Amino acid sequence: MRGHEEFKDVLPAYTAIFEDGEYRTFEIPETLNAILRLYQVYYRDIFYCGVPEAEAADKLRTRLKALLDLPDAGEELLTERLRSAFEAEGYHALFGKTQGYYGPYIWRDTVPTVYRVELPGGTAEYTVNILKGFVFRSWMDYLTFGRYGTGGWTSPDGTINCIAKAYDFESERFLVSLLKHEAQHAVDMKQFPGITPAELEYRAKLVELHYSGDLGLLQKFVSEADETRTDDSHAAASVRIRHEFADTDPTDLSAIRARALELLHAHTKEMEEKYR
């Protein structure tokens, strides 16, 4: 970073954290800052000091147990106590790993928002939790000072949680790739109990292709096709899309949209025969 002018403005902040161990503090009670400080030490261990992730994770757990006075706690109890500590101060908290590394998500407000979503089979209502007032957004956000990070996740009950600052809510990424995709999942799971994950993804990808204005979307799906990943529903759905769009002009948006709708209608008839 010292050798590149474009990093001049942010270099002091990285130097303070990674070279000097002067960790960030947040506008939250000190007891909670102490918890987040241990995660910052963990990031420094891994990404700056080169400590193997398993060793750094073990140190993190040991330090958290000592801080909370839970020397013999398993990971489930430890996670529950961490979450309770933040919730007691009015925050929402999610703990665990993102892409192989520990990191909490801490935020103030969850705003359930109902959207009316147009789909090929009619209009459906779909609820999205909009998450606001973030204090901490796991490791990628931390390392990039907010430039990159998780945009959201799906709760165990199927509800989509969107981090407000990560989305342009007027964009196709939100309105089509998230809303229409997930709303189609909800409709299909209700209409076709027993539908497989690969079938769900295939249908949702067709809906995306029907409504998308992005010529690159079809190529994106085709590039994700992988017949060797039989347990990956996205890869399996993309294999079918690659095959069924083989004769469709990839530069003709209207042809892609029409083909997607044709395939969806045909697949709906297939599903009706299979699951009814």
Image: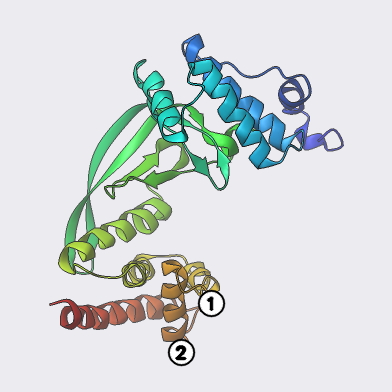
Residue drawn at x 45%, y 28% as measured from the top left: 78
Residue 46 can be seen, yes or no = yes
Q: Residue 258's quadrant in the figure?
A: bottom left
Residue drawn at x 30%, y 59% as measured from the top left: 180
Please state which of residues 84 and 73 is positioned toward the viewer in this rendering. 73
Task: Look at label 1 and name its amino acid.
Answer: Thr
What secondary structure is found at the residue carrying circle 2? loop
User: Which tag, 1 or 2, sits closer to the chain's start?
Assistant: 1
Apparent side of residue 3 relative to residue 64 in the rendered image (left or right): right
Quadrant in which the N terminus is drawn:
top right
Characterize the local packing of mark 1: few (<14), some (14-19) or many (20 or more) Cα atoms within 10 angstroms: few
Identify whether 86 is placed above or below 254.
Answer: above
What secondary structure is found at the residue carrying circle 1? loop
Q: Pinpoint residue 169: horizontal percent, then vertical percent.
A: 37, 44
Identify whether 119 is placed above or below 43.
Answer: below
Q: Pinpoint residue 24: horizontal percent, then vertical percent.
A: 62, 19
Toward the right, the furthest residue is: 3
Identify whether 265 is placed above or below 33.
Answer: below
Task: Look at label 2 and name its amino acid.
Answer: Asp
Q: Which residue is mark 1?
A: 228
Characterize the local packing of mark 2: few (<14), some (14-19) or many (20 or more) Cα atoms within 10 angstroms: few
Toward the front, the furthest residue is: 72
Q: Pinpoint residue 124: horizontal percent, then vertical percent.
A: 18, 57
Quadrant in which the C terminus is drawn:
bottom left
Toward the left, the furthest residue is: 276
Q: Which residue is mark 2?
A: 247
Please state which of residues 51 and 106 is positioned toward the viewer in this rendering. 51
User: What separation in Å lies between label 1 and label 2 (alpha carbons)?
Assistant: 23 Å
Please state which of residues 143 and 125 is positioned toward the viewer in this rendering. 143
